[in-house]
Amino acid sequence: MDVRFTGPESNKLSVEEEEKLMTYLSKAAEDVKNLDQELVEQAVLGYKQAAGEVERKFYCDQLLMTLKDILTKHSEMLVPHTAEMYMKLMIRDIKIEHVRVGDSIVIRCRCKSTDVLLDLEKLVASGELDELFSRIMSCLINDTVTASVTISQEQFKNCLESVTTDAG
C-alpha cells in the first residue's frame, strides 16, 4: 500500500512531520506485533465464521478494544484512529510487515491467500483507509490533511501471482 498526504499548504510532509509519523507508526506496529496472536486469531476466525453483521461487529469490537488497550501509551488522540486502522486490517487477516516513510508512506502487508488480498483491495477501494490515515495524520501534525491510499496495479498483480504460486 502506498499512502500519500496532501495538506492545505503543500503536497509533501516536512522532515519533522515525516519523522514524527514514522516514529509513531513504527512504535505502534511493534506494539501490535507483540500482541497475543491467539487473541487475534480467535477474533479473525470468529469474524470469518460469523452468521451475520451483528456477530461480525462483535468480533471487530473485541479486537478494537484489545488494540486500544495496547496502544494507550501513545497519544490519546491517535489511539482510536490507529486502533481502528489496525482492526480493519487484522480482522481480515492482513498483517503489516513494514512501514517506510519517504515521498509517501509505504506499508508492506502480508496476505496469505487470494481472498485476503482481494479483501485488502476492497478495503483500499472503499476509501475507509483514506479516511483513517487522514485522521491519524491530522492529529499528529495538528492540521487538516487528506490521505490517499493506493495499491498499484503492478503491485497487485505481483502479489496475486505470488499468493497463487504459494497456494499451488
Image (cartoon, rainbow, N blue to C red):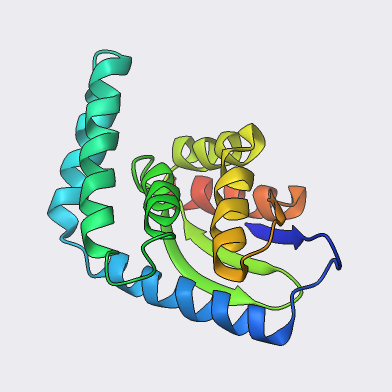
In terms of image quadrants, where is residue 126? top right
Quadrant in the picture for the N terminus: bottom right
In this picture, is 83 found above or below 55?
below
| Left or right, 75 with reference to 34 | right
| Left or right, 4 with reference to 69 | right
User: Where in the figure is residue 166, as x and y percent of width and height?
Assistant: 45, 53
User: Where in the figure is residue 12, as x and y percent of width and height?
Assistant: 81, 72
Q: Residue at x 21, y 58 (%)?
A: 69
In this picture, is 9 found above or below 20?
above
Q: Nearer the viewer, residue 111 or 100?
A: 100
Quadrant in the picture for the C terminus: top left
User: Where in the figure is residue 46, as x and y percent of width and height?
Assistant: 20, 31
Q: Nearer the viewer, residue 46 or 65?
A: 65
Q: Residue at x 29, y 71 (%)?
A: 31
| Left or right, 145 with reference to 33 | right
User: Where in the figure is residue 111, as x and y percent of width and height?
Assistant: 45, 51
| Left or right, 60 with reference to 157 | left
Q: Residue at x 76, y 74 (%)?
A: 103
